[in-house]
Structures are given as structure tokens and as C-alpha cells.
Amino acid sequence: MTLFMALFAAQEAHAATWTDVRGYRIELHSAPQRIVALAPSLTEILFSLGLGDRIAGVTDFSDFPPETARLPKVGSYKNLSVEAVLNLNPDLVVGVVDGNPLHDLERIRDLHVPVYLVDPKTIPGMLESIEKIGAITDRAEAARDLVDKLQKRLDCISRLTKGLPRPLVLLQIEQDPLVTVNGDTLQSQLIELAGGRNLAADESARYPRYSLETVLFRQPEVIIISTMQENAGLTKQLDRWNRFPALPAVRNHRLYMIQSDLIARAAPRILDGLEAMFKIIHPEIPIDCGSTP
Amino acid sequence: MIAARPRNILVVSGALLLLLILVMIIGLVSGAVTIRFQDLWQMLLGSPEVSVKRTIVLDIRLPRVLLAGCVGIGLAQCGVVFQTLLRNPLAEPFILGISSGSALGAIAAMVLGFQFIGAVSVCAFVAALLTILLILGIAHGRGPVNTTSLLLSGVILNAFFYSIILFFIATTSEEKLHSLLFWLYGDLGRSRYFHVAAVAPIVVLGGIFLFGYAKNLNLLAAGEEAAHHLGLAVERTKIVLFVTVSLITGFVVSVSGVIGFVGLIVPHLVRMMLGSDHRLLLPAAGLFGASFLIAADAGARVLIAPTELPLGVITAFLGAPFFILILNRKGSGWGSS
């Protein structure tokens, strides 16, 4: 009897109305079984909550975890195919406020498919998104555990960076032309959290095409190249910088590479990105916070 | 209009050369970082002291100014020749699809991730060559190369190449988007001395070669039939000129990306001021084109510094209104000599 009651309660708990960050309300009668994730970060979040087998479709460039490769694609997150989404007959579509075209989301919603938006633009925003997605997919507990673990790793890094000098960092997104990140980006938050200062934080464009001479003038102490390329391409990119010994980063051999998807996606792996960034900016400090997994 | 006597050619070229030197100095002192005029002198005269500002001027700005100059000379002179060759005031290096073919080569190299040294420039140049062959092939398929079929095949190839470029843009990851787009709007931010070393000889030798054809270009401008009666091998001359300017265009685009309007505005401005004798027009357009592009690139670096603008934005934005102003005041000068 108690078992029955508990089951009933769980069912009941799930037949609920949820309101997303944009104020849209969705009603779910049972835990969603066919979820379409409209951004690579959302795909990663769903997998990390153990929902991989409930994903019906993902966007182009969703490449992690590797199992994602065999999932149907619905276009890129900025250029969705509404038809492809509907064709998968989803019972929940998860999207991002910043990126998915609003008119496409409206059309999906108009056809009575529940659309739930999250806003994982910052690391706290990502943690919040994980909890929210956990709640609507009946994975609240897994989500809380995950968020706790991630929060601990985050706290560890912020403890370690306290009181350390904060070197000036140039993060290179592209070399031809030179493109970096301003203060509004996830990448820039990582630089600051890892105990550095972003050289282009004050720019107005999120991904400004930056003047090379300003880089020379501002004298970055660390240059990080964000790339998915293998070593051959990387050596070429490093050589470009090595012709400027007037840069402290070059004189002191502080040119590094970081895997771009680790620092650009608001997904649990961003903590790997943060730790990699910390090792680059403060190589002298071991990451050791006792209980960190 | 000025008569194309040797003395006049020298005077006009001398004056434009002075303008070019002035603009080069302005180009060297403008940028996101303030560099004073007196410091510039010391650096250029070679004080051995290694400083950041010296690196900025000598390793970043100077190759860029020189490359902008070469590209300007090339585009402007090619514009002059294309307009005469095709007897069409709208002809410029871009209308024939050579630039978009070249851009397609560059973009394909980026998207496919070719890694060998200079991959992007090499692919851009090879694509330009293939485009030239394609245009000649299409135009030749209908008997002797005539102007209309050249223009038409160029316009159609342009549309075709752009569709493939847009396909690449639509399917590429956001990471690579910047480099793709900047190729389409022109970019001299990559300039290195070896780019200058590769392009300068082509532009200079090409310029001398074209100057040697100045009289024949004058004949062609007067009408193909008249030129034929005056003993010019019209068909052969047209092909030689076409291949020459296409090669120059290919070289130039492979280091700068697609920079619109220079090949259109500069030749017309110079025509309006000096008349359409090619002995005067060619050197004047080249020198003025160099000044124009160096100034435009300085603008691209300064306007919203330290963010840089694509060069094509400046050339079109400044070029178009200026052009309309002159056109209304002086008439196009097209066809009058």
C-alpha cells in the first residue's frame, strides 16, 4: 500500500506545470521520453544526468559524448529545421535563450510540443540549468548530486586563486584574423575564475577581431590558443607568436593551447576547462582540495 | 583633360607618388596604439633599440602598408584594363568571377583544414587560375572570344561560386566563421613581409607590362573595328591582356581577400580627372589606387580600435558616396578622350 502511494505520489509530482526562464509555461504529464536538445551544451547536460537513451535528436556539432554521433540531427542551434524537430515526435524540446531563433521556438510551441528554455550563459547559470532540466525530466536527485560535485570543484579553484597574482591573458579564438573574447563570454569568465585577467574584457563585441598591435602594446603575460586542431596546425600558430619576442608571453615561453569545446560550452565539462585553464595560468600551484574527486 | 605627353605623365606620376608617400606615412602613424611622428622617424632611420613600438611599426604596420599599396596598385590597374577590354564602365576584377573563385579556393582550404604552409593563399591563387580557364573556355565555346560572352560567363560564375561559398558558410562551425567572412570582406591583418615579397614583383612587372600595352588599349577603347583596321591583332591582344590582368587579380586576392570597389572607383576617378589616355591613366590609377587602399586600411584599423573592421566595409562606405559626388559634378568621362 505504501509502495503504491509512493508510486502514485511520484506520478502526481510529475504531472506538473513548469515555468522556464522566459516565463513560458509547459505542462508535463509524465517524465519526458523523447527529448530534443537544441544546443551541444544541452546534449552534454542530458547525458550527464543519465538521460542519453531518452534523447531523440540533437543539433549539428553536438559531438560529445561520442554516442551523440548516431543521434538524429535537427540542424545547427542557430539554424534549426522545425520540420526535423517535429518529425522526431518529441515530448520535450529543450532550448537555450541565447542562440536558438525565437520564431522557430514559437512555431514548435504552436504545434503543441512543449518547449523549455534555459539560460546557461554563465557557470552559475549552467548549474541552475542542470537543476531545472533535472527537475522536469524526473532526475532532480541526480542533478543535485552533479551540481554539488561541480560546485565543489569550482569552490576549490576559487580558493586556490585567492591572493595569487593575476596575469594578463590573451585568449586566441582565431588567428586569421586574430579573434579574441570580451568579458561577456564563458571563456572570459573562465580566465577570471582561473586567476587571470582577460586582455580584451572591455571590448563591446563578444568575439572582437582584435588589433595585433594592441596585443603587443598591452603585453599579455600568457597567450592561450583555443583550438580543436591537432599538433601540426598548432605549431604553425605558435610560430606566428614566436616572431614577437617583445611580448612577455613569448619571452617567458608562456604560449599554451586549450581544447576549444572545453571552454566554450556551458556543460559539466566546463570544470575540466576551468582546471586546465588554472594549470595554464598558475602552473606553480597543484590542484589539491582534499576531497575533490 | 591632360594630354599624354611624356612630360605630363612624369608630372602627374610624380605628384601622385608624393601623395602616396604622404599616405604611407599617415598609414604608419595611425593605429590602435599611438605612435608619434618624431618616433617614427627614429625607427625608420634605424635606431637599434628593440622596443614594443618599434615592433609595432616595423613588423606589423609597415608590411601591412606595403601590402595595401601593392593590392591597391593591382586592383586599380586591373580595373582600368577590364573596363577598356570589356567596353563596360562597370567591369572590375570582381565582375568576372575571378575574385569569388579565388575566395572559394581560400574558403575551401579553411573548411577542409589544409595545413601546409600558405595553404590558403596557394588555394586562392590556384582557384583564380582555374576560374580564368573556365571563363575563357565558356566564352570560347561560342566562337571567337567576344565581350558579351566574357561578361556573361563571369557574372554566372560569380553567382555559382557565391552559392558554394554560402553553402560553406551555412554548414561550418561558428569557430571558423570569422575567417570565412573576413575573406569575403577583405583583410590585410595577416600581412607579412613574405606576402609583400610575393606580390610586389607581380604588381610592378605587371604594371610595366600593361603600360607597354597602353597604346593598344587606346586603340581598343576607340573600337575593335577601328583597332583592327589600324593593324592591331585584336583577338590576340585581348587574350594576352585578359590573362595578364586575371593573373594579377588572382595574386592580389590570394593575399588580401575580396576587396570590392577599388577596381571600380579608382579608375573612374582618375578618368574623370585626367581623361582616358591609357599612358596617363594606368600609372596614375595604380599610384592613386595604392594611396586609396592604404588610407582605407588605416581607417579600418583606427575607427573602432582596438577592434578592426573588414577592409571592404571601408572601401565601399567611403568609395560609393565620394564616387556619386564626383559623378554628378563632372560626368563620367567614359568614352571621352
Image (cartoon, coloured by chain):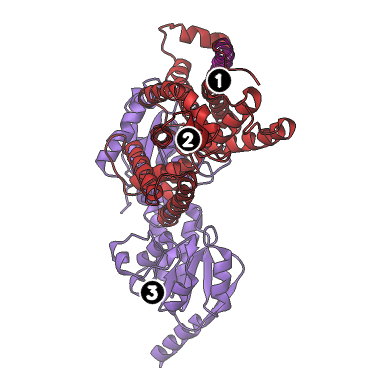
Which of the pair B269/A217 is nearer the observer?
B269
Of label 2 and label 1, which has the lower sequence position? Answer: 2
Look at the image and give the residue range highlighted in magenta: B7-26
At which x and y percent is residue B161?
43, 51
Considering every residue shown, the one lying at the far right of the view is B329
Numbered mark located on residue A110 in the image: none
Report the quarter where the N terminus of chain B lies. Answer: top right
Say if mark 2 contacts mark 3, CB within 8 Å.
Answer: no
Which chain does tag 2 point to?
B
- Residue A257 is covered by the magenta coloring: no
Q: On the image, numbered disc 3 is attached to which residue?
A: A56
Say if mark 1 contacts mark 3, CB within 8 Å.
Answer: no
Q: Which amino acid does label 1 sit on?
A: Leu
Could you give the CA–CA distance between mark 2 and mark 1, rounded to whole angstroms?
30 Å
Identified at 50% across, 43% down, the residue is: B95
**Which element is circle 1 on?**
helix
**Which element is circle 2 on?**
loop
Which of the pair B202/A143 is nearer the observer?
B202
Depicted A139 relative to depicted A167: above or below: below
Q: In which quarter of the image is residue B198?
A: top left
Chain B appears what colour? Answer: red
Q: In which quarter of the image is residue B90?
A: top right
Around disc 3, counting alpha carbons within 10 Å, would you say few (fewer than 14), some (14 to 19), or many (20 or more)?
A: many
Q: Are marks 1 and 3 on the same chain?
A: no
Residue B336 horizontal side relative to residue A81, left or right: right
Identified at 28% across, 62% down, the residue is: A66
